[in-house]
Image (tube, rainbow, N blue to C red):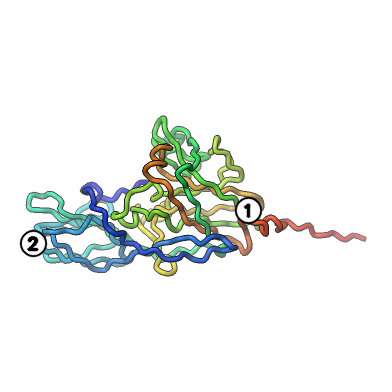
């Protein structure tokens, strides 16, 4: 869902600069898949701000149990806000420094009380490793001519009046303003061989999510959404849904809307990546990539496409495979065991 950082209330037009993040090769794709791309971003422990020439408003990442020390020059006053927008600290008279805990925001003001600069310090947590083993790693792309499906009007008034929940499932919410609800999508078929629990998670996007760095252009791909179907019909997306989600942070209520997990190699998996677990039976399933935000065709074609999401599938040993792989098709998930009598 949309990020609710307090600092965005003061956000000005940013001058494009080089992205903070560094691209590195992803974890090797399994079973002959194409390699994916994931991202690293530095964790912040200290920074300096000169209010006569402040840096661009930015998102900073800190260890979940830690903080960042901020030294200030030529800054008349500041306030530190917690995740509920409460002021927990303020100072005036050319303050020298402060310490900003994880999941807090710093806003610096001029003498007249107008904001000069602000930044959110988002928490990074240790990885919650899915159960089982990594079975497949894939990249799903959304090209300029990506197909669309219509999700229909809001259907859970008990929860939201501007979202549609696929199959009525609470974790399957997609933006759907009245009269709208078009979403571009891509699909990928898997073959489940072993019954069990499977986890599907996004680990990165291209272009880089603006939730990772506000210096990157905003794009709907910043909030991707994964859904799994036993049989996907784009004309009836509420049917045959097994599971879906658009935000890892849905499962970390105590952490707030803006958090991340740090994977191997320093990769930061930002909290707006999709993550869900489903109990599956053997058979063909279709993974559908779409976006939480509704995007009409012309906007996607002209302003945002192409884009892609890197994701992983975890589960029981040898539990699933790429349905398009001939080696996968050749596997019999339910071998017939001869029965001897007499």
Q: Earlier in the sequence, mark 2 or mark 1?
A: 2
Residue 171 visible: no
Q: Percent from the top left, x then y, of residue 110?
A: 10, 53
Q: Is 168 in front, or is 180?
A: 180
Residue 332, numbered circle: none
Residue at x 54% of width, y 58% of height: 313
Foreground mark, 2 or 1, reads 1
Q: Percent from the top left, x then y, of residue 45?
A: 26, 68
Residue 98 is drawn in which quadrant? bottom left
User: Callout 1: 10 Å neighbours few (<14), some, many (20+)?
Assistant: few
Would you name the residue on which mark 1 appears? Answer: 324
Residue at x 44% of width, y 36% of height: 181
Which SS class for mark 1? loop
Quarter occupied by the C terminus? bottom right
Q: Percent from the top left, x then y, of residue 247?
A: 42, 51
Would you name the residue on which mark 2 appears? Answer: 94
């Amino acid at each position: 869902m949309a990020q609710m950082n307090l600092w965005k209330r003061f956000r000005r037009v940013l001058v494009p600069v080089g992205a903070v993040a560094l691209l590195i090769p992803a974890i090797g794709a399994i079973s002959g898949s194409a390699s994916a791309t994931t991202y690293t971003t530095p964790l912040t422990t200290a920074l300096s701000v000169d209010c006569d020439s402040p840096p661009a408003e930015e998102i900073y990442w800190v260890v979940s149990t830690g903080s960042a020390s901020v030294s200030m020059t030529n800054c008349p006053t500041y306030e530190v806000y917690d995740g509920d927008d409460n002021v927990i600290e303020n100072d005036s008279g050319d303050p020298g420094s402060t310490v900003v805990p994880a999941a807090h925001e710093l806003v610096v003001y001029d003498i007249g009380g107008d904001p000069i600069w602000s930044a959110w310090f988002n928490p990074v947590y240790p990885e919650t490793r899915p159960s089982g083993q990594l079975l497949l790693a894939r990249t799903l792309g959304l090209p300029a001519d990506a197909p669309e499906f219509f999700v229909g009007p809001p259907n859970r008034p008990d929860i939201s009046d501007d979202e549609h929940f696929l199959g009525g499932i609470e974790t399957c919410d997609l933006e759907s303003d009245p009269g709208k609800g078009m979403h571009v999508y891509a699909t990928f078929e898997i073959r489940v061989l072993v019954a069990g629990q499977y986890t599907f998670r996004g680990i990165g996007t291209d272009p880089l999510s603006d939730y990772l760095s506000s210096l990157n252009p905003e794009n709907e791909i910043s909030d991707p959404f994964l859904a799994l179907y036993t049989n996907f019909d784009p004309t009836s997306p509420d049917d045959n849904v097994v599971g879906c989600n658009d935000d890892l942070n849905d499962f970390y209520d105590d952490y707030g809307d803006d958090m991340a997990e740090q994977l191997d190699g320093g990769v930061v998996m930002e909290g707006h990546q999709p993550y869900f677990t489903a109990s599956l039976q053997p058979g063909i399933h279709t993974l559908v990539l779409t976006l939480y935000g509704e995007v009409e065709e012309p906007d996607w074609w002209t302003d945002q496409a192409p884009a892609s999401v890197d994701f992983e599938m975890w589960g029981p040993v040898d539990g699933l495979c790429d349905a398009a792989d001939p080696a996968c098709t050749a596997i019999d998930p339910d071998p017939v065991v001869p029965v001897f009598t007499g």
